[in-house]
Amino acid sequence: MHDIIIIGGGPAGLTAGLYAGRAKLKTLLIEQMVAGGQAATTDLLENYPGAPEGSTGPDLTERMEEQAKKFGCEFVMGEVTGVDLSGKEKVVTTNVGEFKSKAVIITSGATHRKLGCPGEEDLIGGGVSFCATCDAAFFEDLPVAVVGGGDSAISAAIYLTKFASRVYVIHRRDALRATKVVQEKAFANPKIEIVWDSVVDEIKGSETVEALKLKNVKTGEFSELPVDGVFMYIGLVPNTKFLQGQVKINPAGYIPVTANMETDVPGVFAAGDVTAKLLRQVVTAVGDGATAAVAAEKYIEDNF
Ligand SMILES: Cc1cc2nc3c(=O)[nH]c(=O)nc-3n(C[C@H](O)[C@H](O)[C@H](O)COP(=O)(O)OP(=O)(O)OC[C@H]3O[C@@H](n4cnc5c(N)ncnc54)[C@H](O)[C@@H]3O)c2cc1C
């Protein structure tokens, strides 16, 4: 049996792994893909303290993983499909086996939201993408679109201008949500064109994306925009499905926690983007992860 099982290897989980390992607790981190989480999908983190030149997400999270491993945190690649958190001994079920521990830290983060329009599902991998850093290079000198108006969307649009011939930002409102400094960079970039008050009604294409059918939400008019790729940045869905009925989850799907990252179940903690909170960023995820590990250590000391 492990002391602590951490579910998810993004910045919150990797930091929890570092702190728990360094406290000499027998710690297992379960990650369904490569470690790094959402942070590993962004090419530039400009707001993580200590790197004024900005660091890339993959660089930063690879170093986090190395540091957690250095202090003895074990890693298993597998998807957590269910949990039984009711007893003193916690059971975590995955597609590669069952694991038990005295405490659990949930750091399963969040996943991109899909638009749900016709063509989206069929053309994933054929020009529909959720990660500009991963796929931008496929669109050298081609026109692409980004859907969304927040920080992630506008940062992705700016990044895409390094490759694409033109980047259309499709935004359903008449003002962006992104922070001012990011907006200013986008407005100053001649390759970016913002299509205001518009939503994607359909993604057209047989094998690959050929065009977007857009609807202007103010006039109700439809138009067609020829593009070779479309990048979705329309928000997040918390990864809490495997927890149903086990810990308290709010109506939006996030886990409410105390200041010490405790959930409503003794011995179960949550950290990072999966929790109900104001700011979902790397800097808050790592702080949450550290707190969760120390709180779990204290719980184990007091209860075992
Ligand atoms: C494109 C983009 C750009 C961003 N830019 C910035 C930025 O500039 N600055 C900044 O501070 N933040 C940025 N963020 C936000 C930042 O990446 C997140 O706040 C941070 O990664 C949250 O960390 P986390 O560990 O809580 O969750 P996540 O990073 O979401 O990691 C969760 C991990 O859990 C795993 N997981 C989920 N479910 C399971 C399961 N059932 N079984 C096993 N593993 C599971 C996932 O595979 C994932 O690796 C950006 C995010 C995106 C998407």
Image: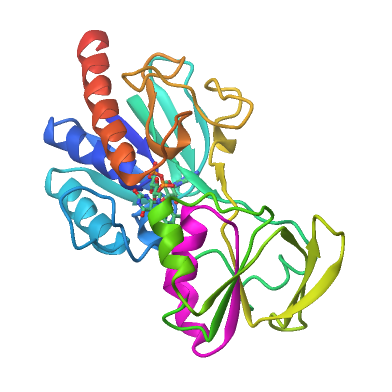
Span shown in magenta: 132-160
Residue 270 percent across, percent down from the top left: 40, 29
Residue 274 located within the stretch drawn in magenta: no
Left-right relation of 85 to 225: left
What secondary structure predominates along the stretch shown in magenta? Answer: helix
Q: Of residues 9 and 5, which is closer to you in this image?
A: 9
Residue 264 percent across, percent down from the top left: 46, 14
Q: At x 39% / y 13%, what residue is drawn?
A: 266
Q: At x 70% / y 56%, what residue is drawn?
A: 115
Residue 126 percent across, percent down from the top left: 64, 78
**Residue situated furthest top in the rendering:** 302
Left-right relation of 117 to 84: right
- Is there any visible trace of residue 85 in the rendered image? yes
The answer to which image quadrant residue 33 occupies is bottom left
Q: Which quadrant, please, contains the N terminus?
A: top left
Q: Which quadrant, please, contains the C terminus?
A: top left
Q: At x 60% / y 28%, what residue is drawn?
A: 244
Left-right relation of 35 to 264: left
Q: Of residues 244 and 227, which is closer to you in this image?
A: 227
